[in-house]
Image (cartoon, rainbow, N blue to C red):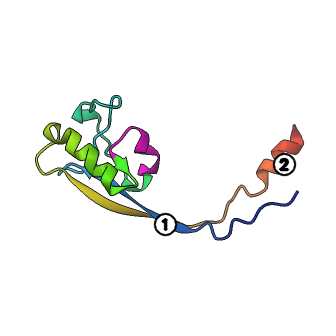
């Protein structure tokens, strides 16, 4: 079986997050309701890419601004839209080939 070469997978991507003055990213209970501030995201910023479905994290500034404006009255004074970048670098996979060995064992 030949694998398709997608080229260099390393790179970076930018995203925007609504961030409170104390470094929290508001999360949503549903499409229109903010969670209680005690439940807002506080983990390391580098892990935010997966949060865009339930946190105020966006790949587009206009989308970030639209939600910021929608929730502005409920956000702490000083909350802003901040920009971030994440570098993606392929590293040595210590488990390289293990998926094939596992399949062969079945």
Secondary structure of residue under mark 2: helix
Q: Dot 2, how many residues are within 10 Å of its Cα: few (below 14), some (14-19), or many (20+)?
A: few
Camera-side mark, 1 or 2? 1
51 in magenta? yes
Instruction: Name the quadrant containing residue 25.
Output: top left
**What's the residue at 88%, 41% (across, down)?**
105
Horizontal side of residue 102 vs 52, given as left or right: right
First along the sequence among labels 1 and 2? 1
Front in this rendered view, residue 77 or 99:
77
Kindly tell me whether residue 66 is visible in this rendering: yes
Secondary structure of residue under mark 1: strand
Please name the residue that numbered disc 1 is placed on. Answer: 12
**Image: 4 above or below 79:** below
Quadrant occupied by the N terminus: bottom right
Image coords of residue 31 (percent x, y): 35, 31
Write down the region rendered in magenta. Answer: 48-56
**What's the residue at 13%, 38% (across, down)?**
73
Measured in 3D between alpha carbons, the distance from the residue under mark 1 to the one under mark 2, in whole angstroms, is 32 Å
Please name the residue that numbered disc 2 is placed on. Answer: 101
**Image: 33 above or below 42:** above
| Mark number displayed over residue 63 | none
Image coords of residue 57 (percent x, y): 36, 48
């Amino acid at each position: 079986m030949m694998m398709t070469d997608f080229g260099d997978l390393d790179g970076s991507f930018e995203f925007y997050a609504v961030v409170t003055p104390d470094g929290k990213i508001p999360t949503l209970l549903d499409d229109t309701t903010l969670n209680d501030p005690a439940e807002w995201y506080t983990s390391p910023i580098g892990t935010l890419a997966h949060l865009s479905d339930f946190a105020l994290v966006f790949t587009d500034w206009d989308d970030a601004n639209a939600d910021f404006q929608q929730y502005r009255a409920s956000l702490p004074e000083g909350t802003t839209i901040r920009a971030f970048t994440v570098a993606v670098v392929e590293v040595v996979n210590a488990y390289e080939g293990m998926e094939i060995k596992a399949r062969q064992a079945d």
